[in-house]
Amino acid sequence: MTDGRSGVIDKDLGWKEIKRQVSEIGQKVVKVGFQTGTKTEKGFSLPMVAAVLHYGSSDGRIPERPFMSNAFQKNQDKIRHAQEALVDKIYKGKLTTDKALHLLGQQHVGQVQREITEFKSPGNAKSTVRIKGFDNPLIHHGRMKRSVSEVVVSKWEKDSDDAS
């Protein structure tokens, strides 16, 4: 477009899209956890089972096994560095905000899955070990580990149980 007087042509080479993506950075979040509607092999709500395993049961029979918190705490520096690198790519126009958040979420999914695999204490009760044949308190058939996922949502969406 020319201004009619100077003959200057103003071409947008992507700046408007970069500005739009940068404006979205504070508007969206990535949630990592267990999505509503996923079920265990026996039909129980997987987000509920994960919550009981994480916080323990109210009757105390299932001890607290805070695998989600552990995964986040152990990886805070990696998460922060990844955030910084991804924001830099958004500023340079190399990634959209959605893609950056999905990449960050996928990285943390792997960290949570690793924590599920490596979590050892408190272990299973002896009776549970006899049934399962091994003592990994967060793995039975592997469904919970395989079901960890990420979802990008608007920061302003009402909190729901999209990801536990």
Image (cartoon, rainbow, N blue to C red):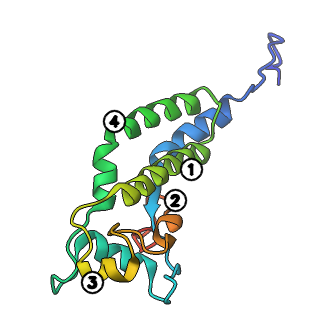
Q: Secondary structure at mark 2?
A: strand
In the image, taking residue 25 as reference, residue 75 lies left or right, namely left
Residue 82: x %, y % from top left: 46, 35
Report whether 55 appears left or right of 37. Answer: left
Write the residue at 78% across / 23% down: 11
Q: CA distance from mark 4 to mark 3?
A: 39 Å
Type of the residue with mark 1: His
Any mark on residue 77, and which? 4
- Counting from the top left corner in percent of width and height, residue 131 is at 37, 83
Task: For marks 3 and 2, give the one nearer the viewer.
Answer: 3
Asked if 13 appears above or below 72 in the picture, the reply is: above
The amino acid at mark 3 is Ser
Q: Mark 2 and mark 4: span between their CA atoms?
A: 19 Å
Cα gap from disc 1 to disc 3, whole angstroms = 40 Å
List the residue tagged with mark 3. Answer: 127
Mark identifier at residue 150: 2
Q: Quadrant of the C terminus?
A: bottom left
